[in-house]
Image (tube, helix red, strand yellow):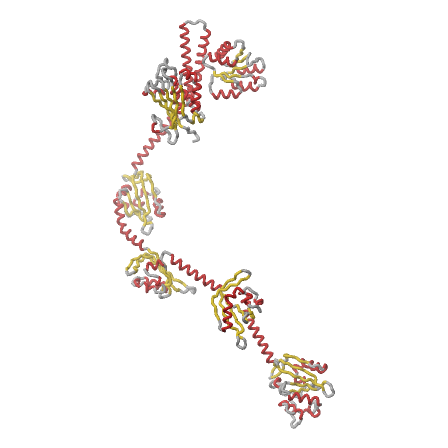
Amino acid sequence: MTYQKILLIDDDEDDQEIFVSALKQVAESVRCTTFDDAREALGKLMSQEILTDLIFLDLNMPIMNGQQFLIEIKKNAILHSIPVIVLSTSSHSGTIESTRELGAEDFITKPDKFEDLIRILESVLK
Amino acid sequence: MSLKKVKGNNFNFIQGGGEMGEITRSIDWNATTLGTPDKWPPSLRTTLGILLHSAFPMFLFWGKQLTCFYNDAFRPSLGAGGKHPAVGKTGPEVWEEIWEFIKPLIDQVISTGEPVSSEDQFLPIFRNGKMEDVYWTFSYSPVYDDDGEINGVFVTCTETTRKVQTIQKLIETENHFKNLIREATVGIVLLIGEEMIVEVANDAYGKLINYNYLELIGKPLFDIIPESEPYFRHLLENVRTSGQPYYLYDHPYFILTNEVKKEGFLNIVYQPYRQGDGKIEGVMALCHDVTEQVLARKKVERNERRVRALVDSVPFPIGVYIGAEMTIELANQTILDIWGKGNDVIGKRYTEILPELESQEIFGQLHNVFTQGTPFHARNQRVDLVAQGKTHTYYFNYSFTPLYDLEGQIYGVMNTAADVTELNLAKIKVEESGKNLRNIIVKAPVAMCIFTGPQFVVEIANERMIELWGTSFSNVINKPIFEGLPEAKNQGFEQMLTGVFTTGEAASAQGAPVVLPRNNKPEMVYVNYLFEAYREANNEISGIIAVATDVTDQVIARKQIEKVVAERTKELAEANNNLQKSNAELAQFAYIASHDLQEPVRKVSTFIQMLENSLSEVDERSLNYLGKIKKSSARMLVLIRDVLAYSQLSRETEILEVVDLESVISDIQYDLELLIEQKGAEITQNGLPSIEGIPLQLSQLFANLISNALKFSRTDIKPVITITSSVFESEIATGYFIPDPGRRYYHLRVKDNGIGFEQQHAEQIFSIFQRLHGKQQYEGTGIGLALCRKIVQNHHGHIYADSTKGNGTTFHVILPEKQISNDN
């Protein structure tokens, strides 16, 4: 499955930069929109201002965290079918379980090595 | 008034005829309506002729006047005085009292010409000066005169008074007799003939054989009660033929009525029954039902037997003596044994068989009881009895009790006794030993005393007791204890001693606080004491024995220790509490810290890589520096992660599962596949058990051990790692491990043939951050084995290492099969 448009919701600037950089190396043509506020992202998605094929979601965010976003998006008739991949610093099994239950497609721990991130993105987007 | 007699009448037709003839001839017939006999008609003269000469009583009424004529034979019927002579008088005149009755008869005969007769006719007449009851059998017949007209009535009659009266009397007697029989309470039956036919039977007999007595009459007895024939017929026969009466007493009988048996006992009298001629016609049986009496008597006999048997079986002596002579009627075996006599004493006199008692008071006592009627009881009496020529001394409690008959008269004396010889002999011994007791108490190594009576008078007390009481002998001896030692009052001892004295149950205490004088001042001391009931020989409680020891010093010492221990425990508890709290805080801190620390370090690491990638031309030195930064940050990340993992181990809220160690090892092998291949290592496992634990931690434990083994392998030989298990034998426990008794443990061994280390470092290696080798030689944070130890501790086990430098290492892991959860 090839994705054309993807969305990244992460409140950390640096993580955003790392992600975008890795993405460029993996799939240049893919367009990525980033949000640092999940609520804003949700609003824009629901009003169809933004369209996306795939969402990468951080968990630990102020105002609205990843789990809350997940719950909301899965309620939406149109948006619920968009695959959501959770990308988080946590490696806690409980957390992983719960996000899967909330409907996340996959759970990826933010890797230490840049190469690892590239490999992951490769496997997802290819 | 009789008619004048006229002499000299010569009437030939009335010759003879005895006296009546004479009288008849001598009557002055001129004065009557008949006139002189020569004028009488021939029919009259003929009839008279017959009448006067007949020997049979006859009477004639003639003519309208019914003039009376009668003969000698008739004369007696007129009795003495009264009517006779009545010749020549008229009928109504003579028979005035019965004229009402006989006139109609006379008229009837005269008018009909038919005779009239009657038998045994009751017609009382006046004679012998009074009205007499007379019965007549008579006939009135017509007499025709010469004209052929009936002119008179001829009467032939006999007086049947006696016959009738006799018959009446007979009937009366018979009835009387019949009534007697009928109403007799004794069953009476008269049996006639060989066939024993019932001629007479009364109600009582009928009841006896369950029959209506009226139905018996005329039937052969043994047709009615065939069941008794075999027993009674021959007896009846004998009486009937021999004429000898026969008597039966308390004779059993039975009657079957509709298959139901009626049984009983009878007294029977059989009498031969004779006819008037003396010939035996049958048998009269009188049957008296004595069933009740017999049964009652048998019952009494039975009871008597039972009483006798009972008396005989009783294990204490019983004797019964009858009459003023005290004749022995009853003596059971026990009393016979004591007397040393046999059964032959029955019927003999008491004084006869026990002459040796004469000088002792017993005969007198016995006699008094019999004459006065007051029972006599003696206790602990010494009685010397002679048996087989030897004198034996006994002690008895004995009683003589008067026996009354139904009329309330004393007819005998009952003697019961209890042999208390042994008791008394023992008592004598006890009295002697009473003195011994005193000695024992005085010399006892503990405080002892004896209180006597309900006032607890101090009878004996030894020196130690006096010391314990903190007083002197003179203060307490022979006084009630609470009087001689007032300090002892109101501490509960009054109630306690009373309890022991009344119930006999001992009271005791250990280390009890008691206030007693010390140096004349009341002080709290601690005492072990025992109060026991002191009994006499007869088991009566007469006092209390007390034994005591002063344990004040021990108690005080113990209290001190307790206090210290309590404080210590409190301190420990507090310390433990604090420790737990700080542990918890520490864990949390470590968790948070390491988690947050990871973030920037990760970024550093990543950006370094990104930097590396973006730099197309980098000089050697810059690359070098970059490399070092990368390595350091990578190391920091690993360190932080390990610390995080380590801190997470403190959390105890993990759920226990049964973990199959075999599959854990297999999984680890799979995870470390690359490394294993790289090293060319061989990992084998053998018979690993399943144990209860936290799966992730156990996994981590073995992962660390195995990766260590791989890390520290020798390069010159093929690394071989074996993991084996056995049931833990406690004899070879080492270190600080104290296994829980009753819990099963497994001893797992992870053995490698790697580089090993010196045994002296065996403890050190488990310390956190401890390394035995330089960072350059072997990777690793140094936290791995600390982690392993923490995991093993979490599972309440033990880990230690054996190694020789250059020759491999064995890690020993001891883990319990089951964890104690909160539910256990």
Can you name the residue that lies furthest to the right here?
Answer: B147
Query: Percent from the top left, x then y, of residue B13?
Result: 67, 91
Can you name the residue that lies furthest to the bottom here?
Answer: B8
- Dividing the picture into quadrants, the one containing residue B495 is top left
Q: Left or right? Give the position of A10 relative to B531.
A: right
Q: Left or right? Give the position of B75 relative to B356.
A: right
Q: Residue at x 32, y 33 (%)?
A: B560
- Dividing the picture into quadrants, the one containing residue A75 is top right
Q: Residue at x 39, y 23 (%)?
A: B723
Instruction: Say if B488 sits above or below B172 in the image.
Output: above
Q: Nearer the viewer, residue B230 or B786?
A: B230
Instruction: Say if B183 sits above or below B73 in the image.
Output: above
Query: Percent from the top left, x then y, of residue B367?
Result: 35, 64
Query: Percent from the top left, x then y, of residue B266?
Result: 49, 66
Query: Percent from the top left, x then y, of residue B440?
Result: 26, 46
Quarter placement of the C terminus of chain B: top left
Instruction: Say if B770 sits above or below B70 in the image.
Output: above
- Dividing the picture into quadrants, the one containing residue B175 is bottom right
Q: How many marks?
A: 0
Q: Nearer the viewer, residue B629 or B141?
A: B141
Q: Nearer the viewer, residue B110 or A46?
A: B110
Quarter placement of the N terminus of chain B: bottom right
Q: Nearer the viewer, residue B49 or B564?
A: B49
Q: Is residue B375 visible?
A: no
